[in-house]
Image (cartoon, helix red, strand yellow):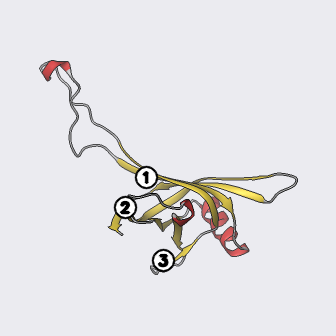
């Protein structure tokens, strides 16, 4: 993947459950990480006593984090409502020239900050809550 503008990485949510995704907030920075737990199956006869892992085992998870400013009162209210009610909704993470990751996520953290001479900003963390799909760009 060639160098891309960070602003082109989008975070969208399906607010109605009807499959229509809308961009949420004005994110200034965001990250997406996929994790896979390992299952260690090392035993006394493992070659050279090197660790062995069981392929395809363990739980997979994804985490999305972002920070920025809300673009309007509606997106502010949506995110706040999802955070307070532990709502699980379909989200999309769109990575330019790579593809789209889509699936259910729950807001696990929502923080607000502000300087006396600046705007109120937020930090958001989403945790995967089910199977994710990937569609190549």
- Asked if the residue under mark 1 is in contact with the one under mark 2, i.e. CB atoms within 8 Å, the reply is yes
Q: Nearer the viewer, mark 1 or mark 3?
A: 1
Q: Seen in the image, is 133 located left or right of residue 33?
A: left
Q: Sequence-wise, which precedes: disc 2 or disc 1?
A: 1
- In x, y percent, where is residue 97? 40, 65
In the image, residue 59 above or below residue 72: above
- Asked if the residue under mark 3 is in contact with the one under mark 1, i.e. CB atoms within 8 Å, the reply is no
Label 1 Cα crowd, 10 Å radius (few <14 / some 14-19 / many 20+): some
- In x, y percent, where is residue 52? 21, 30
Residue at coordinates 53% horizontally, 66% vertically from top-left? 8
Q: Seen in the image, is 97 located left or right of residue 48?
A: right
Q: Sequence-wise, which precedes: disc 2 or disc 3?
A: 3
Q: How far separated are the C-alphas under marks 2 and 1?
A: 9 Å
Q: Seen in the image, is 8 located left or right of residue 41?
A: right
Q: Secondary structure at mark 2?
A: loop
Q: Which residue is under mark 3?
A: 17
Q: Which residue is under mark 2?
A: 132
- In x, y percent, where is residue 127? 49, 53
Q: Point out the image quarter for the N terminus.
A: bottom left
Closest to the observer: 66 or 39? 66
Q: How far separated are the C-alphas under marks 2 and 3?
A: 16 Å
Q: Which residue is under mark 1?
A: 62
Q: Nearer the viewer, mark 2 or mark 3?
A: 2
């Amino acid at each position: 993947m060639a160098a891309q503008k960070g602003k082109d990485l989008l975070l969208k949510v399906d607010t109605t459950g009807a499959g229509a995704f809308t961009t949420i907030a004005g994110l200034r920075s965001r990250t997406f990480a996929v994790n896979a737990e390992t299952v260690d199956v090392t035993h006394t006869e493992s070659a050279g006593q090197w660790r062995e892992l069981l392929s395809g085992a363990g739980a997979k998870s994804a985490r999305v984090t972002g920070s920025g400013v809300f673009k309007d009162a509606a997106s502010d209210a949506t995110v706040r409502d999802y955070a307070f009610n532990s709502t699980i909704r379909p989200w999309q993470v769109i990575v330019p020239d790579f593809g789209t990751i889509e699936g259910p996520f729950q807001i696990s953290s929502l923080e607000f900050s502000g300087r006396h001479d600046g705007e109120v900003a937020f930090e958001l963390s989403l945790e995967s809550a089910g199977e994710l799909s990937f569609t190549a760009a």
